Every structure is written in structure tokens, then in C-alpha cells.
Image (spheres, rainbow, N blue to C red):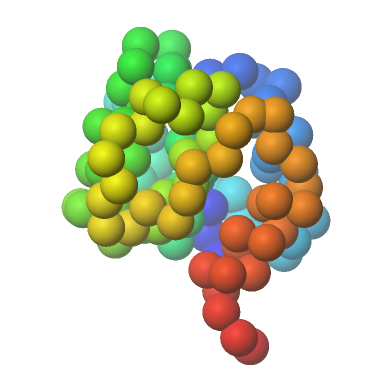
Amino acid sequence: MKVLIVEDEIFAALHLESAVEELGCEVVGIAPDGQSALELAETRPDLAFVDLNLRDGLTGPEIARDLANRYGTKVLILTANPGQAGEPFEGLVGVVSKPWNEAQIARTMAAIRGPN
């Protein structure tokens, strides 16, 4: 499974990258803002972890919808402000409040992968 991380806090992004790789997934990149996220989306990730408040402001909700609509990417929003996530949309698999833990990430990824 190819995963995109959209997060501007580098330590949080690296922690998530490590957790995702331990689950056997490929991280296609870490994007700190909308432009970087859309450039990396060309790799057609299966799943994107998206923070809401990024380097370029509150662009996460728009990025999340764009990834789902344009690329068919499943989206999990990871945020300290879940109220900012907006209305649910097709492709949204959940909203997790920060701080998240590895067990939450593993459960979400297992649900997306489905039965083997």
C-alpha cells in the first residue's frame, strides 16, 4: 500500500512515517503544504494521512477532498482540531485526534486493506 503523509510538523511526520513503514507500507512522501501534497499525489497513493493546519494555512480539508475526488485516495485526517474537518466526503475513512498512537494507525490500515 502506498501512503502519502500531509503534515508540516517534521517530527510528527517522521514518527508517522516510521509507524506506517513498520506496517509494511511504502511512504511516497511527506508534504508540508498543499502544493507539495498535490505534486506527490501524482504517485497515486492508496491512503493519505492529512493534517488540517499546514504550512500554508487551513488547507488540509481542501487537500483531503481533492486527493479523494481526483485520485481515489482514501483519507484519514489526523488533527488537533477535529471540528475543522468539515463535512464527511466519499473517501474519508476517519478523523483521529492528535496525539494519535500506533494502534489507531494499525487498525485503520487493517480496515482499509480488508481481509487478506
Drawn side of residue 14 relative to residue 80, left or right:
right
| Quarter of the figure that contains the N terminus | bottom right
Residue 93 at x, y percent in the picture: 44, 56
| Residue 114 appearing in the image | yes
Name which residue lies at 33% across and 58% down: 91
Drawn side of residue 110 relative to residue 79, left or right:
right
| Residue 67 appearing in the image | no
Residue 107 at x, y percent in the picture: 68, 61
Residue found farthest to the bottom:
116
Name which residue lies at 63% across and 88% down: 116
Give the vertical position of 4 relative to 14 (above or below): below
Give the vertical position of 46 relative to 75 (above or below): below
Q: Nearer the viewer, residue 113 or 83?
A: 83
Residue 81 at x, y percent in the picture: 49, 22
Residue found farthest to the left:
70
Give the vertical position of 5 relative to 98 (above or below): below
Name which residue lies at 53% across and 52% down: 3
Give the vertical position of 106 relative to 94 (above or below): below
